[in-house]
Amino acid sequence: MAEAVRGELLGPIRVLRGGRELPLGPPRQRAVLAVLLLREGRPITFDALVDAVWGEDVPGGVRNLVQKYVSGIRRALGEDVGPRWTGSGYVLTGVAIDDLAERRALLARAVAARNAGDPDHAEELAARAEALWRGEFAEGLDGPLLAAERRRWAEKRLLVLEARLESLVERGRYHECVHELMRQVAVHPLRERLVWLLMLALYRSGRSADALVTYEETRRRMARELGCDPGPELRELHQRMLRQDPSLSAELTPGRDAGHSPGLLPGSALAS
């Protein structure tokens, strides 16, 4: 019976065969493998592969380099797994991005649980999906395509985190999420949705002064770094806090009136 081969990109690239991590060669060879994995069984032309890995900084003898790296990937993965040339380009067979597939499945189950009225189970499933991350997407590998994918997946990961924190705020679990929101706002100080949620969690947990300070710090930073004021939702929340709007304690999260479906996991966080 053939040993199971597992590919992972939610962190530094890994391929495991029978549970044993395979040596994948030098960084550029691993970058070629990562690009092939991202094609998910679809062929990629030689020129597209070069563009994805090197961009405009194409070295001399790149055709020989690609052939060398492809051969190295075949040796690393084994005879029955690896890239092969077809009439339309290179195709990687026998290995897929399994951790990404598991993440998608867990988040889809989380959405189903949320829609079935079981937010606790939805949160558990979303937390399991988050635990699959071992670092940044394809961490440490260079190339235009991988850099773009790394930025894209960082945003998608943050969307899921925001939705999870929003769900906790909606359900009155303010003390559980205040410290995580503080940490995330420190990392992403100009991300208004995180600031909104932090202000609301602070206000509802009896820390209205801290909520107002959070707004003022954000306003000053945006003026200094972006030359603008906070957006209308953040400004409105601030004004309602100043006048101690009694309905604020019962309201849920931003975007509901704009057609956003509040709660765990927006659809954009599930799309690949």
Image (spheres, helix red, strand yellow):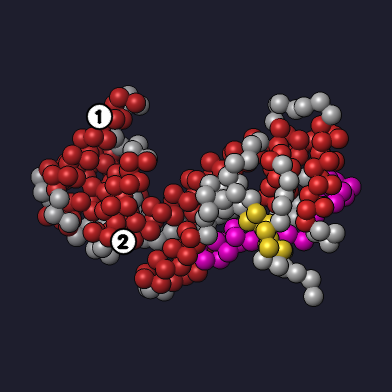
Q: Indicate the amino acid at tag 1.
A: Arg
User: Could one spot residue 153 in this view of the protein?
Assistant: no
How far across and how far down the image is residue 198, in percent?
Answer: 27, 49
Residue in the foreground of this view, choosing between 23 and 69: 23
Residue in view at x 29 percent, y 26 percent: 223
- Give the left or right position of residue 101, taking residue 119 as reference: right
Q: Is residue 40 above or below residue 190?
A: below
Looking at the image, which residue is at 29% across and 44% down?
A: 195
Q: Which residue is mark 2?
A: 168
Q: Which residue is mark 1?
A: 220
Q: Is residue 110 left or right of residue 202?
A: right
The tag earlier along the polypeptide, 1 or 2, is 2
Q: Secondary structure at mark 1?
A: helix
Q: Residue at x 18, y 56 (%)?
A: 204
* Residue at (59, 41) in percent of width and height: 140
Residue 224 in percent (x, y) is at 30, 24
Q: Which quarter of the figure is the N terminus placed in?
A: bottom right
Q: Which residues are magenta?
A: 82-107
